[in-house]
Structure formats: structure tokens, C-alpha cells
Image (tube, grey):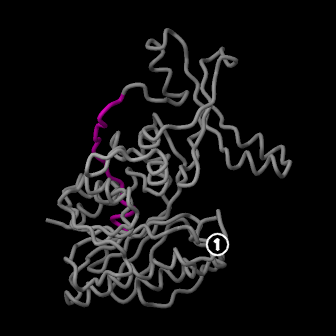
Amino acid sequence: MLTLGSLFDGIGVFPLSASRNGIIPTWASEIEKAPVSITKRHFPNMLHLGDITKINGGKIPPVHIITFGSPCQNLSNIGKREGLTGSQSSLFYHAIRIIEEMRCATNGIYPVIAVWENVMGAFSSNNRLDFKAVLETFINTEIPMPTSGVWANAGMVRGNHVDVAWRLLDAQYWGRPTLAQRRRRIFLVADFGGRRATEILFKARNLQSFPTSCGKNRLSSTSTSRIFVSKTRGKIPIVRPFQERRMRSTAKEKNKTGFIGSFGRTHDPFPTLLAGSVNYFSFWYEGEEQEGFIRQLTPLECERLMELPEGWTALGYKNEAISDYARYKAIGNAIAVPCAEYIMAGIAESL
């Protein structure tokens, strides 16, 4: 059986996606209290290793696959952008250290595959040198900058018996069309045992459909909600998300075009869920705009946008209720399930 270790585990999206593809989640590293409790509830047999800086990769159970969505705060376009030298995003190198220690301890056998996930800002931070450093760290070979000076949204490199491919995935094109979230993330696959990275990351494949615990009262986009007209007494519900952060900044700057653009249109996806803010949307029935209202997404609706099983973040392993604040933060830091599932399905198929 294939096994997986998850660094910077969060609420266990990679273990969830792995288990759905027959891969056994063996251990995880996470320090946030609420996410640890959530994953202990869902994966009671998974070993929790705690602080990544205190882990020796040569002394933990070897696994076939190591996944890690290292902290993005210093790489994101929102923030000071210290890059990989920042106190949080520099933890990337601890993940690489653990991989190297494990490979050394197992004579280069484990792990076979590593998966790194991060924000799109990693392409441009530190004058675009951070992503160059990421690639060079994986393959231990110098890589020239692209002649265009800009990193492509997809590509591959090879060096020193390591096959690396990367691809920018936007969650709005990978999940169910009923609810879409604009969430662009870089996924990088490193194959230490062959040349399967491109097959894992670029091959088209059909994914299984996993039902959630409940499908009632879901918010629907205008395009799909017309199917349910009979259930709303002939009325057509309209849902329009808007970008509150952009709205506030453009209003402060007196940028009229940007302010108007912050309001969602009929078929727009929801803005990216963020750990530090709550998303809002407007709702009305067609022709009854004056009767509409504005409210924020609930934690349950955020779970649906990420395609997590409903109630995934509601309780901890001792059945303690997780606060809404902790749920919003954990979900905003998480990985969209369909994107993780696509990669885990590719790994299971290739190995």
C-alpha cells in the first residue's frame, strides 16, 4: 500500500484526498490547535509529529509521498513580500531538509514523490528569484531564468535524477459547477524515482464523485439555479459574490472603476477564501432586487466552496465544537479538495 506524510497539514486535505485514492495517511505535522484536533478526529490512526523544525526525517516512518503547502504569508501578493527569506515562508527549507534526511536514511528509496503547494505570488516574489530557488532546491541543479523573465503557469525541469513539474490550478475549474471559488495555486510534483511528474500533473483523468453529508439548501449560481425553479415557487434565485477587500481599498483610493469591478456579476465565482477575512455575497430573486439582502458565508458554505465534506471542521477529536473564527481561518488556509484529489489520483495511478 502507498503511504503519505503531510507537512504543514492544516485540516488534512491531502490525507483526505490520498485516502480516497487508496493511499494511507501515515503521519502529519501541524502546530495550530484547532486543525490538529480536526484531523485527529478524521484520521485517528495518523501519527501527529508537531513542530516541523523539530522533526528529523531520518527518524520518522518513511513514506512514499510527502506533501507540503508551506506558509505563503511572505510570498503572497497581500503583505510585505519578504519571500523565502521571510520568517514563515522560509519554513519551506525545513520540509526539504526532512525529505533529504528520509532519503538519506532509506538509501534513496523514500519518499518517491513530493508535492508542494503555494500561492501564485511565489512566481513573482523576490524579483521572481524565489521560484527559481524552489526548483533548484528540488533538483540540486542551477536553472536559468526564463528568457521572457516570467515563469510560465506550467512547466517541467529535470536534474540529478529528479523529475519536477509544476502547474497553476484554479479551483473554480476543478470542482462542481454549482459553487465555484476563484482559487489559483501552484502545485509542484517532484518524482525522485522516475519521470512521472508530467504524467501525474498533466494527464487528463476522470475523478470519483464523493457525496457530502447533506445537499439541502445549497447556494447556487444563477446559471445552475434555474434547474431548481420549481422548488422556489417559480422564482429564480440570484447569488452574486463581491470582493470586500477590493471594495474597501478602491473606495479609499476613490477608484471608481475598481470599486464597480469589485461587485460580482451573474456568473462570477466566489473570491478566494482567505484566512483573515470573511466573504460576503448578495442574494435576491429575479425581479425582486429591492427585497434582496447581503450576508457573509457561513463556515458550512465555506466548506462547500472547498468541496470538503460538510461539517469537516465543525468538531474536534474530543467532540468539542470548533469556533467559527477557527473554522474560517483553517478553511482559508486549506487546499481545494478537487485539486488535491486530481494529483493524488495521478500519483496512485502512476505508482
In this view, the residue in front, 62 or 286, is 62
Measured as percent of width and height from the top left, residue 57 is found at 28, 83
* Amino acid type, label 1: Arg
Measured as percent of width and height from the top left, residue 329 is found at 49, 53
Residue at 35% from the left image edge and 39% from the top image edge: 310
Residue at 53% from the left image edge and 31% from the top image edge: 221
Residue at 20% from the left image edge and 61% from the top image edge: 23
In this view, the residue in front, 281 or 136, is 281
In this view, the residue in front, 173 or 321, is 321
Q: Is residue 112 left or right of residue 32?
A: left
Question: Helix or strand or loop: what does disc 1 sit on?
Answer: loop
- The residue beneath circle 1 is 81
Measured as percent of width and height from the top left, residue 268 is found at 60, 38
* Magenta span includes 332: no
The relative height of residue 351 versus residue 161 in the rendered view (above or below) is above
The relative height of residue 194 versus residue 344 in the rendered view (above or below) is below
Measured as percent of width and height from the top left, residue 78 is found at 64, 62
Query: Tag count in the figure?
Result: 1
The relative height of residue 8 versus residue 59 in the rendered view (above or below) is above
Magenta residues: mostly which secondary structure?
Answer: loop
Indicate the quadrant containing the N terminus: top left, top right, bottom left or bottom right: bottom left
| Mark 1 neighbour class, 10 Å CA radius: few under 14, some 14 to 19, many 20 or more | many
Residue at 33% from the left image edge and 54% from the top image edge: 341
Q: Which residues are magenta?
A: 198-215
Instruction: Please identify the residue farthest to the right as the structure is shown.
Output: 254
Q: Is residue 116 left or right of residue 154?
A: left
Instruction: Please identify the residue farthest to the top as the structure is shown.
Output: 233
Instruction: Please identify the residue farthest to the left as the structure is shown.
Output: 1
* Magenta span includes 212: yes
